[in-house]
Structure formats: structure tokens, C-alpha cells
Image (tube, helix red, strand yellow):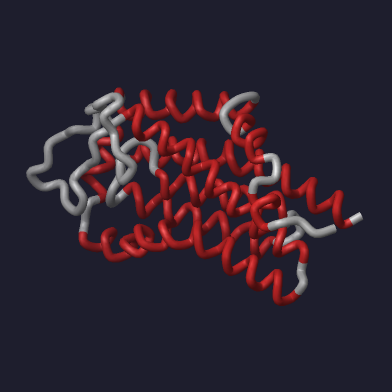
Amino acid sequence: MRFSIMHILFFKLPRNFARSLWSYSFFLHLCAIGFTYILISRGFDWFYFQHTRSVVFLWVFLPAIVIGYIVPFLSPLILYIRGKSERNFRKLNAAFALGQATIISFLIFSFFKIIAGRAAPELFHAIGAIDTSREFNFLEGGLVSGWPSGHTAWAFAMAVTLWFLYPESKKIRYFSIVYAIYIGLGMSVTFHWFSDVVAGIFIGLAVGVVVGKCFRNRYSQLKN
């Protein structure tokens, strides 16, 4: 049975989007807010910032900024091309799953960023920096920085999606998790406060579980 690219990419997307916000996912979003409040109120964001802005961390994690932007768009495309050329339905299914996870997580974290309007930390150093970790300008936020970390949400949404799609492949599952952790750490020592990253993890988990289960079931049904 053949379907158009857009049909598969948007397969149950409205439902998956809603489930990424509601049901058990709502608890994960509450965790994102709750842990953010705890980290800020206890001063951990500022403490972490003061002890992680260094040249060493910058050079180790600077690639995460670029990689975190490119991979969410390139990986579905590469998987689609490979799946199409190899006539591998599983890779095609994974390509569309990652594409949908990217779309849904982008919509969710963009909404939260605009609502929260959180001030970003100093990019590269802590010397002379002012503690703005408690500064939120509600409804005045942009999409580049702020709460939550979009890079992290994307990375964990994709990693968890692959975790469900390839349960037998330790290589794929653990590589994707290591990638997500690297992106998260990279964001926590550059553009974001630590709590931004924690919130991004919870949002990525919410999206990844929903999309991963949906496309896993789709693959199982069409394979049989």
C-alpha cells in the first residue's frame, strides 16, 4: 500500500500532538516546570553557570550548538533517502517518525519559549556576569534561547523515538541517548541555564514516547 510523503509524515499528528501535551505527558510537563522552580529557587542555575563557563567546556561542547540544529532536519532526510534506495520500510518508517517528533517538539518548545520569555545567561564566561537566572519576561520571549532548551527537547524526542523503534538494537538506542546527553550538556554550558536543559529533557521524553509508540505500532501493523 502506497502513501504520499505528507500523509505519512502527518500520520496521526494532531492526536500525537495532543497526547504530547495531555494524558501522562501532562505529568512530564509539570515535572519540567517543577524542577525548573526548584533549581532556580535553590540557586543551582547560578551555581552551575559559575562553575561551567570555561574555555575547555566551550571547545568540547561548542559543536553541540551546530549539530543540535542540523541533525533534527538532516537525520529524517538521510534515513528517508537510504530507506527509499534500499526499499527498507523500517528505515522509511523511522524517517517519518523522526520528522514528526521534530515537528511536534518544535511546536511545543516554541510555545513555551514565547510564554516564559526567560533571559539567557552570558554565553561564554561568568566573570563579571550578573545573575539573571530568575528573570522571566512572560509573553516577551523569542525562539533562539530561553526556557526550555529546544536543542535538548529535539535531541531527546528523537532519541526516545528511536528507542521505541529499534528495541533490539543496543547500538542505535545507546548512541541516540549519548547524542542527546551531549547536546543537553552542550546547551547547559553555552546558551542555556541548567534548568532550561532539564525542562527540554522532559518535553523531549513526552514527545518521544508518544511518537515512538505510534510509529512502532504502525510498523508492526503494516509489516504483518
Kindly indicate the quadrant of the structure image that contains residue 38.
top left
Foreground residue, 66 or 166? 66
Image point 24% across, 32% down: which residue? Answer: 133
Please determine whether, in this image, residue 62 is positioned above or below residue 53. below
The answer to whether 8 appears left or right of 135 in the picture is: right
The answer to whether 128 appears left or right of 141 in the picture is: left
Task: Report the residue that reaches farthest toward the left.
Answer: 128
Image point 21% across, 61% down: which residue? Answer: 55
Could you say where residue 106 lies in the image, as x and y percent from the top left? 47, 43
Image point 64% across, 53% down: which residue? Answer: 6
Could you say where residue 138 lies in the image, as x and y percent from the top left? 29, 24
Foreground residue, 30 or 181? 30
Task: Report the residue that reaches farthest toward the right.
Answer: 224
Image quarter of the N terminus: bottom right
The answer to whether 23 appears left or right of 73 in the picture is: right
Please give the count of numbered marks on the rendered protein.
0
Could you say where residue 13 lies in the image, as x and y percent from the top left? 64, 40
Could you say where residue 121 lies in the image, as x and y percent from the top left? 22, 42
Image point 12% across, 36% down: which residue? Answer: 130
Task: Report the residue that reaches farthest toward the bottom.
Answer: 85
Please determine whether, in this image, residue 78 is positioned above or below residue 213. below
Foreground residue, 175 or 208? 208
Image quarter of the C terminus: bottom right
